[in-house]
Image: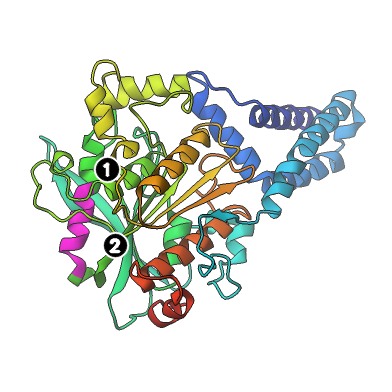
Amino acid sequence: MAGWLLALLGLVSLGIAANARWPRQTLPALIPSWALAMAAVEFAIHLTAIGLIVVVVLVASGALQSPIGDVGLVLWLAAAAAAIPWGRSSLRTRLDVEGRPAELDLDADDAPSFPRLQIVFPLLAPWRRGVRHERGKVFARVGDDGRELKLDVFRPAKDPGRRLPAIIHIHGGAWYFGSRHEQGLPLLNHLAANGWIGINIDYRLSPKATMPEHIHDCKRAIAWVREHADELGIDASFIAITGGSAGGHLASLCALTPNDPRLQPGFERADTHVDACVSFYGVYDLSDPGERQIPALRRLVEKIVFKTTVAENHDLFKLTSPMEHLRRDAVPFFVIHGDGDTLVPVAESRDFVAALRDASDHVVLYAEMPGGQHAFDMLPTWRSVPVIRAAERFLAATYATRFGTHGETEDAVERHVTA
């Protein structure tokens, strides 16, 4: 029995490694293939260590006493060898941020540290010492059925005695799945531990919701946070926004369309502007995707999210494309993408950053993570933690200088942000 179990382990491990190397990009395998590839690449060290423990146990139980066990060991060793470059890439991650003013040190030695225990045990991500959570606040009731939309609040456990800047997180999931319960936790906990109030929101999902209802809900959340800033202890002069994948699209669109009445029907007079944006591996051009987007995913979005095609309703796709709303007074942006992303190709961010830099008078930072898969930041890893720390530095510096010169950035951070 031990030999057969080792063979099964080796076969499954090699299959996962092969999928990570050559992921499927056609339906219905697209999403499951990406999910397995992300786990294999971003948690290569963890999975290899766990696999090694299982192998040792099975060998000690007599797995190599049969030829099938020998085959299983060879298969597992091949899978482990394939994982070595992914693990090495993660351990060697160094953040190279393009467009950074010389005075803005995003990798400063004195930047707030991230708990190493959470990197070793990433499932601890929902919890962070020094952070208090307030769950399930209703910020809107929408639709004919009056569905409640909820958010969670992340704040320092100790009362800082002053108002704090805030950041709103929008989860990803192809506008189709996902929730506030499993995304954005490492970033929001890190920010809350260092003097921020984090807001993790839900919004209506497709197929029940049809674009642009998703963006309507996100703007409702911004308006609600601004309206309730006093009771939340938020400095309403600085509310940032962030998100990944579909959340990166929605966060960027919110940042580039402040108070646009076309995208906030029924609450046109509400203040929905934000003061900075951190976007992870987002989709930025829905009206003219070219070769930047996977055809199968594109068809899925048209069928389930928009319920129409670009050819049939080009104006709707333009209205909901961040690339169509570039502006000179765009807020400061920090865009992050992994060059190993097999779900949203990295060209999506490269083109968006180039166009936004041409249009905007404010800073547009860009970090491209070597080997990073889609959703590499969902849990703390050796690759994601440097990005999380850099995002905190960017937000802290932007808040402290209030869009002024960057010469006093680090001094201002020390004065205004709890380290």
Which element carries disc 1, helix, strand or loop? loop
- Classify residue 143 as left or right of residue 234: left
Q: In this view, does 134 lie above or below 247?
A: below
Residue 322 is inside the magenta segment: no
Q: Which amino acid does label 1 sit on?
A: Tyr
Magenta residues (range): 219-229
Pick the residue in front: 133 or 222: 222
x then y, percent, for residue 30: 51, 24
Q: Which amino acid does label 2 sit on?
A: Ile
Residue designated by label 2? 239
Q: Residue at x 26, y 71 (%)?
A: 235
Q: How many marks?
A: 2
Report the mark closest to the observer, 2 or 1: 2
The residue lying at 78 percent from left, 38 percent from top is 80
Q: In this view, does 250 lie above or below 100?
A: above
Front-most of residues 253 and 132: 253
For label 1, the crowd category at 10 Å Cα-Cα, with few meaning under 14, some 14 to 19 and many 20 or more, is many
Identify the disc placed on residue 133: none
Residue 205 visible in the displayed image: yes
Q: Residue at x 13, y 37 (%)?
A: 143
Disc 2: CA contacts within 10 A as few (<14), some (14-19) or many (>=20) = many
Specify the label residue 203 is tagged with: 1
The rendered magenta stretch, by its main secondary structure, is classed as helix
220 drawn magenta: yes
Residue 333 lies in quadrant: bottom left
Helix, strand or loop for disc 2? strand
Q: Where is residue 329 in the image (x, y as percent from the top left)?
A: 28, 54
- Asked whether residue 51 is in view, the answer is no
Mark before the other along the chain sequence, 2 or 1: 1
Image side of residue 63 versus residue 29, left or right: right
Rendering coords of residue 371 (x, y %): 64, 42
